[in-house]
Amino acid sequence: MARRITYTFKNQPREINFAKDKYQDMYQAIAAAEGIDLTNYLNMVRQIEMTSKGSAAVRNFRDQEFARMGFSDIYFIKE
């Protein structure tokens, strides 16, 4: 099943194709589409995963960081 991602970047609605074999998750796909380097973000996620007991800390960090980068309304569209 083909998947597409819709999101808003700096108040501009965008839509891209998503391939699971190319990106781990939709957040990496949208960052790549906008040309954003996620090296520091991914290092911090690894540190949070090692120190936290649940996935809520990682999810909260991810949501805050992507909002700080200018992303909002991120979700999959099934076709």
Image (cartoon, grey):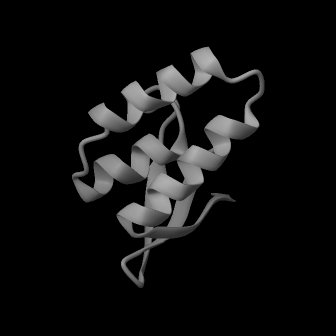
Q: With 3 as the anchor, is 27 left or right in this view? A: left
Q: At x 35% / y 50%, what residue is drawn?
A: 31
Q: Is residue 17 above or below residue 14?
A: above
Instruction: Please report the residue visible at 41 percent of the width from the left and 84 percent of the height from the top.
Output: 11
The quarter in which the C terminus is drawn is bottom right
Identify which residue is drawn at 73% across, 31% down.
55
- In front of the other: 59 or 75: 59
Residue at the image position 24 percent from the left and 42 percent from the top: 37
> Is 9 on the left or on the right of 60, as rendered?
left
Of 51 and 34, nearer the camera is: 51
Nearer to us in this view, 78 or 33: 33
Q: Is residue 49 left or right of residue 10?
A: right
**66 over 42 or under it: above or below:** below
* Residue 36 visible, this angle: yes
Q: Is residue 19 above or below residue 71?
A: above
Give coordinates of residue 62: x percent, y percent. Answer: 55, 46
Residue 29, position in %: x, y? 41, 45
Q: Where residue 16 sits: x, y (%)?
A: 43, 59
Question: Which quadrant: the N terminus?
Answer: top right
Q: Residue furthest top?
A: 50
Q: Is residue 79 visible?
A: no
